Amino acid sequence: MSRSKGDKAEQKACDYLQSHGFTIIEQNFYAKKLGEIDIIASKNGVYHFIEVKSANEYETAVYNITASKLSKLMRSIDYYVQQKNLKNDYTLDAIIVTQEQIEFLENITL
């Protein structure tokens, strides 16, 4: 996927989150040698670390969330939590963006 399409999907995801009461804390947080967290948001005192996946078909986007990707995300999240000295609860989520829909998947795991 091109960077432009990815940026559009991330903007749609941010708009979706804000319309559902989330506050966007940060976008595209990059942890050296670990990876990138697409969106960091909060709601009701809980931090949500969100991976955005976009494709023409829902299944294609979901299958792009691999065990390897989740492992890198968890290491990036751990780094972020340590750097910011966060004491809040947090969760790893995903937002799937297709042409027809946006779906928010909360608390995804390996």
Image: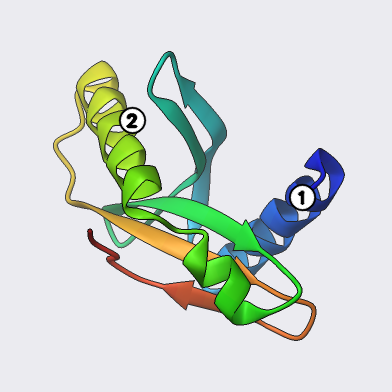
In the image: residue 4, left or right of residue 62: right
SS at mark 1?
loop
Alpha carbon distance from label 2 to label 1: 22 Å
Q: How many marks?
A: 2
Find residue 80 and report its image quarter: top left
Q: Could you say which is closer to the camera, residue 8 or residue 1?
A: 1
In the image: residue 6, left or right of residue 21: right
Q: Amino acid under label 1? A: Met
- State the image coordinates of residue 18 (x, y, percent, origin top left): 59, 63
In the image: residue 64, left or right of residue 89: right
Residue 4 lies, with reference to residue 59, above or below; the image says above
Q: Residues within 10 Å of mark 2 (few under 14, many from 20)?
A: many
Reading the image, the residue beneath label 2 is 76
SS at mark 2?
helix
- State the image coordinates of residue 28 (x, y, percent, origin top left): 58, 33
- State the image coordinates of residue 50 (x, y, percent, origin top left): 45, 53
Find residue 54 and report its image quarter: bottom right
Task: Specify which label sits upstream in the sequence, 2 or 1.
Answer: 1
Residue 18 lies, with reference to residue 31, above or below; the image says below
Q: Amino acid under label 2? A: Ser
Residue at 76% over, 74% down:
56
Reading the image, the residue beneath label 1 is 1
- State the image coordinates of residue 85 (x, y, percent, origin top left): 19, 23
Residue 17 lies, with reference to residue 99, above or below; the image says above
Number of the front mark, 2 or 1: 1
Residue at 23% over, 61% down:
109
Residue at 56% over, 79% down:
59
Taking the view exactly as shown, the residue that stands out farthest to the top is 32
